[in-house]
Image: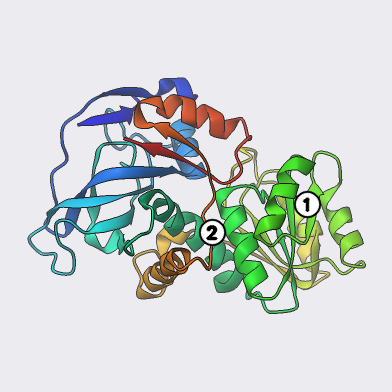
Amino acid sequence: MKAAVYYSNGDPSVLVYEDVADPVCHPKGVVIRVEAVSIEGGDTLNRWRGPLVTTPHIVGYQAAGEIIEVGAEVTHLKVGDRVATVDAFGSHAELRPVPARNCWPIPAGLDPAKAAVVPVAFGTAHECLFGRGGLKAGEVALIQAGASGVGIAAIQLAKQAGATVLATASSDERLDRLKAYGLDHGINYKRDEVAAEVRRLTGGKGADVVVDPVGGTTLQGSIDALAYRGRLSMVGAAGREAMKVDVASLMGGNRSLSGVFLGAEIMTDRVHDMIQGLIEDVAAGKLEVVIDRSFALSEAAEAHAYIESRQAVGRVVLVP
């Protein structure tokens, strides 16, 4: 099969498109013919500095496609089923082996590219807002990196929950595009100091729940934007900077900071069923998956570079 692989960590140019061995199906897994790959922020971070589990290494968490082989111990899936999948690596390829537990059936009529985006982006947003953030109707939610895949998912989910939704992005143009998904107030972080702007927009109160997939220096601003008893879900390191914050600043306002890693619980019934429900909501038109651009699998290097240029609004996908 063809795959986008690399032999060492580095910038997007380390990705090369070449032939590799076809995968072997595990007794408790399946093999899919990949129809779409959702490139995650974690994929670019792993390419940059993550371990090479295989050599050459095929990076990538999420892909959707048609099952072409089923392991001997798998009874709930069959050849021909279309599924969205998540695993630690291996998405950037024509074929993908994955544990059967990490598969979610795609409803008839749903574009596999959109289904591919849901588990990590929407699942993470849901966990940050509700699983750890405890967001309730009438509260204020601040979504850092609102134009990201997780950001757009969180904006929609928070709005549906009855929250007032604030989000940050790098330009007014990108913020304007987010209004269609439920954004109430946008904050241009290149122009405005985020915590101060949050307090201005909330009459001095701050945000009850903050979702921060950026980390680095952004994380302190997220803490400073919290309301009394505010909850912050830290879920990424897209900023690629050291996480140095003043945790003492949490105490005065009885605020809390939680780390979120969906992968640690993705095989539990709770999270598995939550993700399936989100896929069903996308299929029913209750949630919208935003795909900024599609690239051929052979253009994986260009796709990663485009993501790192921070021009995208929503997810970027690869199509074998």
Point 29% across, 36% down: residue: 93
Q: Secondary structure at mark 2?
A: loop
In the image, 111 versus 226, the foreground residue is 111
Please state the horizontal and vertical placement of residue 249, each as a whole percent of the image. Answer: 80, 61
Q: Is residue 126 above or below residue 137?
A: above
**Marks 2 and 1: CB-CB under 8 Å?**
no
Exactly how many numbered labels are in the figure?
2
> Could you tell me which residue is drawn at 30 percent across and 38 percent down?
53
At which x and y percent is residue 10? 47, 24
Q: Quadrant of residue 216?
A: top right
| Mark toward the start of the polypeptide (2 vs 1) | 1
Residue 109 visible in the shown view: yes
Kindly report which numbered mark, 2 or 1, lies closer to the viewer in this rendering. Answer: 2
Residue type at numbered disc 1? Gly
Q: Point out the image quarter for the C terminus.
A: top left
Give how far across and how far down residue 129 sits, in percent: 61, 68
Can you say whether 213 is above or below 256 in the image? Answer: above
State the CA–CA distance, disc 2 to disc 1. Answer: 29 Å
Residue 211's x, y, as percent? 65, 59
The amino acid sitting under disc 2 is: Glu
Mark 1 residue element: helix
- Relative to residue 215, is residue 54 drawn left or right? left
Instruction: State the residue at coordinates (35%, 74%).
Output: 269
Tag shown at residue 6: none
Q: Which residue is mark 1?
A: 221
Q: Which residue is mark 2?
A: 288
Q: Quadrant of residue 313?
A: top right
**Horizontal relation, residue 4 to residue 124: left or right:** left
> In percent of the image, x 69 and y 62: which residue is there?
182
